Image (tube, coloured by chain):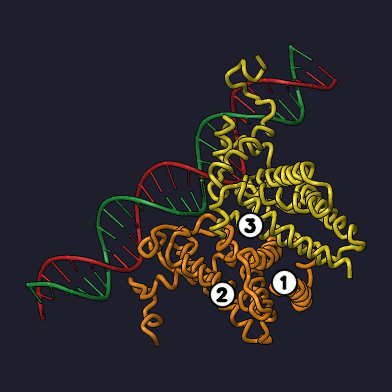
Chain colours: A yellow, B orange, C green, D red
Amino acid sequence: MTARAVKAAPYHHGDLRGALIKAGEAELAERGLEGFSLRGVARRAGVSHAAPAHHFQDAGGLLTALAAEGFRRFLHRQLQRQKKAKPDPVSQMVASGLGYIDFAMAHPALFRLMFSSGRPAHTSPELAEAARAAFDQLEHDVTRMFAANGGRPARDDVLEVWALTHGLADLLNGKRMRFLCDMRKAEREKVVTNMLRTSFTEIAARARR
Amino acid sequence: MTARAVKAAPYHHGDLRGALIKAGEAELAERGLEGFSLRGVARRAGVSHAAPAHHFQDAGGLLTALAAEGFRRFLHRQLQRQKKAKPDPVSQMVASGLGYIDFAMAHPALFRLMFSSGRPAHTSPELAEAARAAFDQLEHDVTRMFAANGGRPARDDVLEVWALTHGLADLLNGKRMRFLCDMRKAEREKVVTNMLRTSFTEIAARARR
DNA sequence: GCCTGATCTGGACACTGTCAAGATTATTTT
DNA sequence: AAAATAATCTTGACAGTGTCCAGATCAGGC
């Protein structure tokens, strides 16, 4: 009964920008980053091939918006994981890492768009801010972990946590670690949890010396 | 004075396959993975747009060959680094990691093609074997590091070394860690060396318990 | 009411990857 | 040596892409 549902195809869409983002996510999920096509997104949204130009400067503009939205979801998933985890700093850090990796495997193309593509404009304020928010959360979690051991992390410690997590996520995403990719999700999570906990505990222990 | 140099454009190229791979590397380096075009490669090789089809099934075929060649160079660079490094197992492992990261920053598009693209056919025997050789070397180095401490690495230990190294390489490649990317190469190498050495030493110490 | 600006369409252009048919040269067979 | 065959490369075509442009449609302010 909504205005959109009544008329078959009103000339003005109403919220085409939002619809294009939603359609873009579907396009990414189904056809992957390499198969992504702006015209395909327009078709999905039931609109002419030139319509997106009025909401995004070009294809890169839409991809930039998609990447920004991706980073927000990315952070959200990490925070969700943390809520369900035990409250001690290491468990929280592990939960965040699991969310990082979980996201990568749930949205492979989007993850690649965010981290391994030159197409989004990383100068865009919207994208830069969304990415920064995710990094800030990571830094915060590492700091808390070190604080529990009576110290503060060096810049390199934060990087190391990030690199380890990101490396796992990216390698899993690229199907590089066969025996891990082939596992069922529950089992894989166990293995990854164990790895992250071991490593993070060691890193945080540096605060004691 | 070679046969190729005398005639301006002989109908048969002689070694077009090799020339296309060389041209493909240039195309990747100059225009990036997203800007890569098969016709562009053909132009670079001074040959008609349909010529590549006689040496590679399609664009993916050329990219697959490029990725395989990339993995061989990748391993080569790591081994070169190891030759110049101190012989103790940790230094050797660090040297390998530095080679890994160095390669990623020297050939960003190629690195992405190898690790973060769905375009190469990873079922290709040539590519699979080249990638496996690199992984085997990594496994060998980690094993040696643990052996020096009187133990053997678990599967997860190998993965952890790999993930940390790969994570650093990929994040640097994506220009995600500003303050590291902006450094001059010599300084960045110092920081990275320090990180790797610290972490690898800790990981190898697990063999002592 | 009308008009300005935002929104969307349809057609055009240059570019892409791939296919098919023909031209040219290498190689093998007779 | 001559002829047939196979490999190599070119030209032309096709559908698909991103982007630009002129025009159609509509919303909201005057």
Q: Do tags 3 and 1 sit on the same chain?
A: no
Residue B17, percent from left and from top: 40, 70
Q: Kindly identify which numbered label has been placed on residue B209.
A: 1
Q: Is residue B198 left or right of residue B114?
A: right
- Tag nearer the camera, 3 or 1: 1
Q: Amino acid at mark 3?
A: Asp
Residue B123, percent from left and from top: 44, 59
Indicate the quadrant containing the N terminus of chain A: top left, top right, bottom left or bottom right. Answer: top right
Q: Amino acid at mark 1?
A: Arg
- Whole-Å distance between the Cαs marked 3 and 1? 31 Å
Indicate the quadrant containing the C terminus of chain A: top left, top right, bottom left or bottom right. Answer: bottom right
Q: Is residue B8 left or right of residue A107?
A: left
Q: Amino acid at mark 2?
A: Gln
The residue pinned by badge 3 equals: A170
Q: What chain letter is assigned to the residue under label 1?
A: B
User: In the rendered image, is residue A192 in sight?
Assistant: yes
Q: Is residue A151 above or below residue B141?
A: above
Q: Residues within 10 Å of mark 1 (few under 14, many from 20)?
A: few
Residue B110, percent from left and from top: 57, 66
- Tag nearer the camera, 3 or 2: 2
